[in-house]
Amino acid sequence: MAISWIQKAVIENPNAEDEFLLPFESQNLPAEYKKYYLAKRQNFFASVAGFRESWDLYISFDIVFLREFADLMVAGSPTQMFPLMLFSNAHAKMRISMELALSGCLAEAYSVLRDL
């Protein structure tokens, strides 16, 4: 049976689990899911470090979203609630899609963004 790249990464770095998983995750996640989650988290950290310009752009975009939330929180009329809900939904989907994309789940990230 061929060794997967996840198992190879863990063999090459036996402390990977201690580095990337929280103690709660190490104690409570099943072994198979732990391998998946470990790889996903390693991909996320590597992507943030390797694509720093994209990460900084995303953070700037998130700051703009949060400023817009501050503007919408001042209730001027009851009709403002609907745009606030739409804006909140779009922001949540952007955050989820960026996390997925940086974790190496590009198809899932695209799917979430397509639902905007």
Image (cartoon, rainbow, N blue to C red):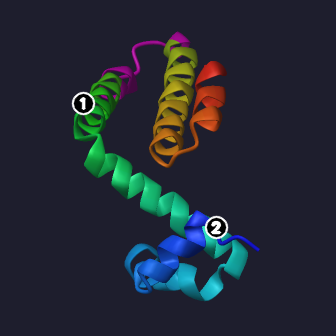
Which residue is rendered at x = 69% and y = 81% of the image? 31
- The total number of labels drawn is 2
Q: Looking at the image, is mark 2 or mark 1 nearer the viewer?
A: 2
Which x, y percent locates residue 74?
Answer: 35, 23
Q: Secondary structure at mark 2?
A: loop
Can residue 46 be seen here? The reply is: yes
Residue most extreme to the right: 1
User: For this rendering, which residue is in front, 12 or 99?
Assistant: 12
> What's the CA distance linking mark 2 and mark 1?
36 Å
Three-letter code, disc 1? Ser
Q: Is residue 110 magenta?
A: no
- Residue 30 is at least partly visible in this image: no
Instruction: Name the amino acid type tagged 2.
Output: Ser
| Residue at screen point 77% across, 74% down | 1
Q: Residue at x 64, y 33 (%)?
A: 107
| Label 1 sits on residue | 60
The image's mark for residue 4 is 2
x and y percentages locating residue 23 in the rendered image: 48, 85
**How many other residues sit within 10 Å of disc 2, few (<14), some (14-19) or many (≥20)?**
few
> To which quarter of the image does residue 4 belong?
bottom right
Is residue 32 positioned above or below 95 on the image?
below
| Extent of the magenta region | 69-79
Residue 74 colored magenta?
yes
Classify 59 as above or below 36.
above
